[in-house]
Image: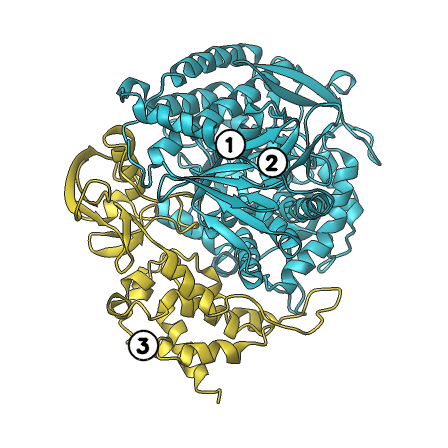
Chain colours: A yellow, B cyan
Amino acid sequence: MDINLKILRYNPETDRKGHWEEYSLDADPDERILDLLHKVKWFDDGSLAFRRSCAHGVCGSDAMVVNGENMLACQVLVKEVSNPIKIEPIRGLPVIKDLVVNMDSFFDSYKKVMPYLINEEEPGERERLQSPEDRDRFEDTTKCILCAACTTSCPVFWTADTYVGPAAIVNAHRFVFDSRDNASKQRLEILKDVNGAFRCRTAFNCTTACPRGIQVTKAIEDVKRETLTIN
Amino acid sequence: MKIIRHSFDGVIVGAGGAGLRAAIEAAPHMKLAVITKLYPTRSHTGAAQGGMSAALANVEEDNWNWHAFDTVKGSDYLADQPAVDILCKEAIDSVVELEHWGLPFSRLENGKIAQRRFGGHTVKEGEAPAFRACYAADRTGHMILQTLYQKCVSMGVTFFDEFQVLDIKIDDGVCKGVVAYEIATGDIHIFEARAVTFATGGFGKIYKVSSNAHSLTGDGPGILYQKGIPLEDMEFYQFHPTGIYRLGILLSEAARGEGGILRNKDGERFMERYAPSIKDLAPRDMVSRAIATEISEGNGAGPNNDFVYLDLTHLGAETIKQKLPDITDFVRTYVKIEPIDEPIPVQPTAHYAMGGIPTDVDARVLSDAQGSILPGVYSAGESACVSVHGANRLGTNSLLDIVVFGKRAGQSMVDYVSSTKPYSLSDNAAEDLKNKIVNFMEKEHDPNFSVPKIREELQDSMEENAKIFRSDETLTEQTKILSDLRDRYDNITISDKGKVFNTELLEAIELEYLLDMSDTTVASAQARKESRGAHSRVDHVERDDQNWLKHSFAFKNGDSVKLDYKDVELGNYEPKERKY
């Protein structure tokens, strides 16, 4: 089928600001959006810049805005979106070139919530025990691939980039509700802060955007509730 | 083009499981940098699904000797048995250590780590399939990658994200550092470091249908090969039996571990004919050959008879949801069918390089088949060949390999750094890379000599001539094709002349590594006149222990490949006929 692809291009070495460029392509309806970008890059304009690696929705490199919604370009097929297809970089982070944004502040926010297991007790020679029920409490948030689709879909984040954002809260949730972790209180103190979980206005954009199907807004609500248990 | 200098004791190239595990070991003892062309969490370890084997005996009686037996038999007796003993023995502590660092394994009712069955893993040396693979649903690799990265974050490990290492500096046989390209700026960075570990992963992109990420282009092996370091056992490339038809996206062996069945167009469970005792859980080389045979004999399904079915419909919605959520989502996303109700079209997909940079059990890189050590250079994970996988890797042993030998690489870096003094590198160290880049920038673009064209022909022809079944005829043909592609590569051009995020430039440089990987694969495969593990010669169908119980070492010799050989280290298990 014929596809009219519009890409928001920006090259810092030649452009003062972004501009739309159009490409006419022949595509199979079962192809991924990522395949279209590769067609442009490989057979039309080699300078088109975008991140990609695994091409099946697990590495989190290719989050972008397709027809107004955040998604992974490798996880959506041509037949699932309307034509013309408009592609822009994810919002709220500085654009480096074309569809590539600077991820520094995103990863800084992630690191702020201490995203690692903290337990000073001697664990012994074998594994710690954890019941399947305890394991299930944080199952959903272990799926995060740090693609930034949630955070950059959040209207609060667009206006206040000091907000840690949904992805950081999801990664805090993963440890706060892990029965093996002893540092929930410290994490929750961080998330009680003015730039923490209570900035969330439950717009649900993050939940819609998550390519891993994580109930992001629910995770944020869980964390908000949990902060009320600490003094 | 700016040139920026850094001074470290050690550098790790690649931030997948092996690189991160090495970093955790080395970082407390030296000034260390981890350099990755992606972000660490984008590494392909994250795509591994089914599990990581260790004889924890949480479900049934097990011990690491049985694991070692299975690994050696699975390798078609080409693995070095002392190395396999290390892998299987250290597996147990490695899993426990990951759990202590927070890895959210799936659990049994008693709270212990859950274990599942996997291809080629048995109890009592072949009696029955073993529950040995420790797992976290079907996203075990994701959890390992996340856990190791989280540990690195907690330790404050220094990362250079989206920097691509493109050169190593070895003077008088001694490693002095690496040279990298900063993707966001086009600047060149010289990293002084006397200990360098390559953990750059595999090179599945030499084939057209592959489970591998676009980033898997053999960078580490390519950089060293171009410096005269040999590559070991390159003829042994694993095709995973169950890639999604046409796309090659991996559907874990865990699907069969949980009871999934392969069927041909008539619905027949054909593995009963090929491996009567363990059937669908035979090792990957055998299952992939069985599928290829079914297809070539006209038993494949679909209008072109070119796939078979992976049938999960009898497992029930609950098992699928609990134990195989990700892979069934892939099927819904890319095939648009519901795997609870319908069988899935699959075909073998290029998956894993058993071969790679030769190392000893301490991850030290070997510079020849006689076992000479290249001081200061290490490799671990898929980029390395220890060899623990021999001619065919068992499922789950790669996630094990990255943590066991990643740790050993880190320890070796510590030993080396603590017993040596720093070297310095001058700005001249950047000269070779700078010239390479300037050459690309100055040469006018010619679409007839573009990266995608040559790469596509490479992938198509490797798929055609050097895949599951090979012969002298197909390999001779492929050698000719590779020589022609190499000639055209010498005139390759790019259109993007910019400095910022010039990934066309990087794809051009990576294509040379893909050509190197293909040359060595084909040359090693043509020389080995036997069939063993993943290397199946239709003109030499038997395994030949008399002449070929040895590892291949492929050296760069101008534009051709020179081969040497090293005997396999045997141990407890004498080579026997491999039946399942």
Q: Residue furthest bottom?
A: A231
Give the residue drawn at x 67%, y 54%.
B29
Return the x and y of residue A132 as percentages of the image width and height. Answer: 59, 69
Return the x and y of residue A8 as percentages of the image width and height. Answer: 19, 46
**Marks 2 and 1 belong to one chain:** yes
Dot 1, crowdedness within 10 Å: few (<14), some or many (≥20)?
A: many
Q: Secondary structure at mark 3?
A: helix
Q: Is residue A158 above or below residue B500?
A: below
Which one is in front, B433 or A4? B433
Q: Residue A96 vs residue B74: left or right?
A: left
Q: Residue furthest right?
A: B572
Mark nearer the viewer, 1 or 3: 1
How far apart marks 2 and 1 lie (CA) works out to: 10 Å
In the picture of the structure, the residue carrying the numbered disc 3 is: A199
Dot 2, crowdedness within 10 Å: few (<14), some or many (≥20)?
A: many
Quarter of the rendering containing residue B276: top right
Residue B176 disc label: 2
- Contact (Cβ within 8 Å) of mark 2 with mark 1: yes
In the picture of the structure, the residue carrying the numbered disc 1 is: B429
Return the x and y of residue B109 as percentages of the image width and height. Answer: 64, 69
Q: Quadrant of the N terminus of chain A?
A: top left
